[in-house]
Image (spheres, rainbow, N blue to C red):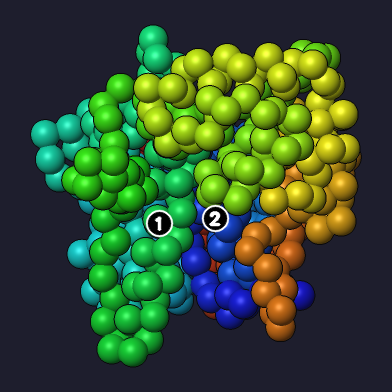
Amino acid sequence: MRQGPLTGLKVVEFAGIGPGPFCGMLLSDLGADVVRIDRKGARGGAPSDITSRGRRSVALDLKTPRAIEACLKLMEKADAVFEGFRPGVMERLGLGPDVALKRNPKLVFGRMTGWGQSGPYANAAGHDMNYIAITGALHAIGTAEKPVPPLNLVGDFGGGALYLAFGLMAGVIQARETGRGQVVDCAMSDGAASLMAMFYGFKASGMWKEGRRQNLLDGGAHFYDTYQCADGKWISIGSIEPQFYALLLEKTGISDPDFLNQMDRNAWPQLREKLAKAIAGKTQAEWSEIMDGSDVCFAPVLDLDEAPKHPHNAARETFVEVAGVIQPAPAPRFSATPGAIQGPPPAIGAHDREALLDWGFTPGEIAALGGSDTQVKDTVS
């Protein structure tokens, strides 16, 4: 039995990589019935395939007319569908939004790509770093010497998967109100640009200087940065507000009057050196004992082994273990309809019969869905 605020929502996912599976995971974690269309003969289902958890897998040969018809029948019964192929691939398969919306006028058709469905780059390959490079985000992140890719959190998952999930839900709400579905063109470059809204506001107000580590939130300020401790581990300090900054000076035992000029940008490099020297005098554990739970705006910098064991994460059960794999629990949390991990990552085709029966297929239709191994290419990350 599925649980969560999206229980009853029916979603078709065309298997892809990176942000597509993550979007499917988010929807499934909150209760949506997500049926993923996989390639016959593909491999999958390992417990470590965390972003594939909670779905049902139907394996189809998309070069057969019966498989195409099966996809369209699934779309007829779905609230939403999403895919991550390059522009034109779904149309060439006969599964484009024009066809799908004729079969189901209330369908919300999500299309997630790096560059979007239009524009000079629309048909070019790319990865997260490329998509955020043209938004100003990558230029602003890194050391003074060079931009540094922030994992693939900003483009793939932030600008892509989260905006796709948000767009799909907005589309479903509209469709339920009006009876009309629509296409959601989710470009990771658009989403990453949207995430930069506050920083474009800073620039317009004169608060933002071009160049990394020169600003309030990019490591330029001595009171908003990471510092290495005596044991080689790191802590994070974010003491922006005056009262928090005063507490930072108190907790570190700093009485140097130069620190009173908190917002003097010219003084930041020198003050960072002094603060770094003070932090280097104690271990991470010692600083945690001094600052944990205070208003300094402090947290230890933890690696992926340490994070699940942190007392705050443990108390909130932020991480869970499934089949021996530590992984993030569903988020966000709901008081009346909590989400849940609905099941393990599925083996490819594990639910060919079960899912299709649930979605209204007859046993004869299911039996007819044979065919050769084939692969749909042109997915994007």
From mark 2 to mark 1, how far is it between C-alphas? Answer: 10 Å
Quarter where residue 184 is shown: bottom left
Q: Is residue 200 left or right of residue 346?
A: left
Measuring from the top left, give residue 153's x and y in whole percent.
Answer: 50, 38
Looking at the image, which residue is at 54% across and 21% down? Answer: 271
Looking at the image, which residue is at 87% across and 56% down? Answer: 315
Measuring from the top left, give residue 116's x and y in whole percent.
Answer: 24, 45
As drawn, which residue projects farthest toward the top? 145
Looking at the image, which residue is at 53% across and 49% down? Answer: 241
Measuring from the top left, give residue 71's x and y in whole percent.
Answer: 42, 61
Quarter where residue 115 is shown: top left
Q: Which residue is mark 2?
A: 24
Q: Which residue is mark 1?
A: 164
As drawn, which residue projects farthest toward the front? 257
Relative vertical location of residue 259 with respect to residue 49 in this rendering, above or below: above
The mark lying in front, picked from 2 and 1, is 1
Relative vertical location of residue 150 with respect to residue 18 in this rendering, above or below: above
Identify the secondary structure beneath mark 2: helix
Residue 215 in sight from this viewpoint: yes
Q: Amino acid at mark 1?
A: Leu
Which residue is at the front of the view, 103 or 369? 103
Relative vertical location of residue 275 with respect to residue 19 in this rendering, above or below: above
Looking at the image, which residue is at 30% across and 50% down? Answer: 197
Which residue is at the front of the view, 346 or 196? 196
Q: Quadrant of the C terminus?
A: top left
Relative vertical location of residue 222 with respect to residue 331 in this rendering, above or below: above
Neighbours of disc 2 within 10 Å: few (<14), some (14-19), many (20+): many
Question: Which of the two labelled residues, at mark 2 and mark 1, occupies the earlier sequence position?
Answer: 2
Quarter where residue 331 is shown: bottom right
